[in-house]
Amino acid sequence: MKIRLLFLMSMFLGITSFSQDFELYRTISGDPMDSEKLGYQVGIEVTVPLEYDEKTPSKYPVIFIFDKQNERSYNYIRTTIDYLTSNDQMPASVVVGVTSGEGMSRYNETQLSTSDSTAYGEKNEAFIFEELLPHIRSNFQGGEHLTLIGHSRYGYFTSLLLTRNPERLGAVISMSPFMEHKKCKLI
């Protein structure tokens, strides 16, 4: 009986360990990035498909997931991307987690100066399109298609970026976004 139980436990642990190899992505960089536009370091994490090889000319769609500091939400979104990729429901992509500032920084990153004179949403927009995106395209084989994923304040901000930059974005996913702010309505 003990041998059977040991055998079953070994099989279960072996299958569980082996199933971890079925993920289609791997994280290759978690280094912060200095932003001239924002004036501080921004935490980023770059996750690429398993077939990613910097020696090949392959290009991949780019996905920015904001609020990486919310690990639970961030990991669910990455797991969903992995699942959709593994079921051929979306192409393999370069996935970039972007850490938001703490406290008022997150508010200021997602608010325009027309609504609040202390906000710097315009600087964050410049960071995203003029610093982060070119960095990903030149260093991690990012392609032309860009998707932004944001929740709450960043849901509002990603929707705002879509209205201001429709030609630069392939898709935006806004979860529970704010739709109105003083002097700026998305509805």
Image (cartoon, rainbow, N blue to C red):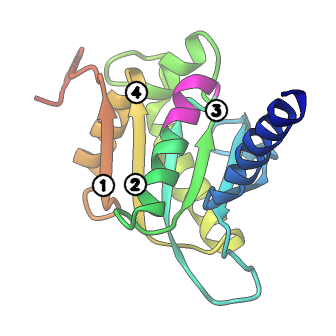
At label 4, counting other C-alpha atoms closer than 10 Å, the crowd grade (few under 14, some 14-19, many 20 or more) is: some
As measured in the structure, the alpha-carbon distance from the residue carrying label 1 to the one carrying label 3 is 20 Å
- What's the residue type where badge 4 is placed? His
Residue 73 highlighted magenta (yes or no): yes
Q: Residue 137, how many percent across, how many down?
A: 60, 70
Towards the viewer: 161 or 26: 26
Circles 2 and 1: CB atoms closer than 8 Å = yes
Res 147 label: 2
Classed neighbour count for the residue bearing mark 2: other residues with Cα under 10 Å, few (<14), some (14–19), many (≥20):
some
Which quadrant does the N terminus fall into? top right
Residues in magenta, as a range? 69-76
Give SS at disc 1: strand
How far apart marks 4 and 1 lie (CA) works out to 15 Å
Q: CA distance from mark 3 to mark 4?
A: 13 Å
Is 165 placed left or right of 88 in the picture? Answer: left
Residue 166 vs 119, above or below: the answer is: below
The residue tagged 1 is: 171
